[in-house]
Image: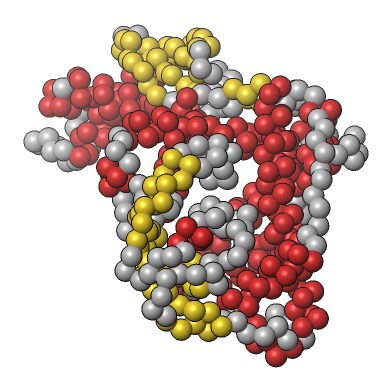
Amino acid sequence: MKIDKKLKPEHQVTLTVEVEPEKMEAYKHRAARKLAESGKISGFRPGKAPYEIIVRNFGEAAINERAVDLFVDAEYTNILKEADVKPGASGTLDSVESLEPAKFIFQVPLAPEVDLGNYHNLRLPYNWIEPGNKELEVALEDLRQMYATTETVDRPVQITDYVLLDIKSEAPELARTGFAVFIRKEAREHEWPYPGFAKELIGLKAGEGKVINHKFPKDWELETLQGKNVALDVVIKSVRSVVLPDLNDEFSKTTGIGDSLESLRAAVAKDVAERSKADYEDKFFEELIEKIKKTAKIKYAPQTLEHEDQHVLEDLSQRLAQQNMDLDTYFKVRNTTREKFMETEVNPVAKKRLERSLILDEIIRQEKIEIDNSSLDQEFNTTVTNLSMQGLDFNKIRGGNQGKQRVAEALAMESANRLLTKRALDTLKAIAMGEYKPNPEKVATPAEN
């Protein structure tokens, strides 16, 4: 084969492939046999008719079409290898320029390329402060509320009440049915759907409602709500007065977290610290990756981003399904079209996710980050335990042993990816804090493949 390669804009390549007449003729004969096997030719057993008879029965065009399909299926991988092309997604046969001689035009999206520059010079202060007694007391209060008893009251909502309500909104992330809210004295940073929401309900009685308008800040943690004005139509279903249990050894045993108040406080303090650190690092790493992106050179084909678009849309579809809503209904509620929604909301999220993933993949490659079997086993077992606690019964997986094997392989891959990502982020954190000490035997150069 003779292959001409031309680079195109948007990180793609055009391959013009000329095929030797003998090779194409062999594919035509193979195509003829395939057609003869699937059809009937009078006087011949299936697949046994001479080539000329098959051509006469099915026509030259049908044989050529099948021959092209067979050629592409069999030779496409060889074409990419011979042309030294690393694809980033499935290519397409753009056109059949001629059949005598056979000449095909392929369009191929290239694999993403990432040049991080000198990311080892990156610096960003890491200033997480471990939560103190105030945060611990708040968490203990939350725990008491989980074990509180309530009684229905016929009066307006007031502070320390539990309220059951329905929320309607054009934003599916905010719609809720039978959502419980505790009215606190002070707004919480992580109060859902935003700090101060619960106090908007004070004064309402069961059966009453109101429309609450709120504008989310541009840096809101949920990207689909960033900078948006939303209306929440709330209706109070019931108001219940709360009776909190005493915070003592007996309560500690009831929770199953500790055998004494002292052990309970220690366990809750540890959990508060872990969650606080996780929240801080989410923002820290987001800022860190944005700093890398400013100087990095990232190339990828439109098809690669389109693939990530579909992942984002699938995630949204699954969340909507939990609320008994499909995408078409969602678009109608939002007064938008699929095309506009993809452009204005899905694509920016997909682009951010894709570029973050490419940066971390390149960190893993350049730093030659690996995971050992012991760490992978531990992560895998943790994943399985968490899924079991969420109600997944592995004995009820469809497909028998093969089905279980497929699930196990998927979970193992997910666990490995999660571990690699964590170690890549830990490496970036060490670099940003000026504490990174590279291992000369492990660090790759940007030119390595």
Q: Position of residue 374 (x, y in %)?
A: 76, 61
Q: Is residue 328 left or right of residue 153?
A: left
Q: Position of residue 236 (x, y in %)?
A: 37, 67
Visual colour scheme: secondary structure
119 relative to 207, above or below = above
At 74% from the left and 82% from the top, the residue drawn is 258
Q: Residue furthest left?
A: 42
Q: Nearer the viewer, residue 443 or 164?
A: 164
At 68% from the left and 24% from the top, the residue drawn is 294
At 59% from the left and 22% from the top, the residue drawn is 299
Q: Quadrant of the C terminus?
A: top right
Q: Is residue 227 left or right of residue 293?
A: left
Q: Residue 291 appears in which quarter of the rendering?
A: top right
Q: Is residue 144 left or right of residue 8?
A: right
Q: Residue 82 appears in which quarter of the rendering?
A: top right
241 relative to 317, above or below = below
Q: Nearer the viewer, residue 20 or 310?
A: 310
Image mark count: 0
Q: Is residue 187 left or right of residue 419?
A: left
Q: Position of residue 381 (x, y in %)?
A: 65, 67
At 66% from the left and 21% from the top, the residue drawn is 297
Residue 390 visible in the shown view? no
Q: Nearer the viewer, residue 144 or 252?
A: 144
Residue 40 visible in the shown view? yes
Q: Position of residue 87 (x, y in %)?
A: 53, 27
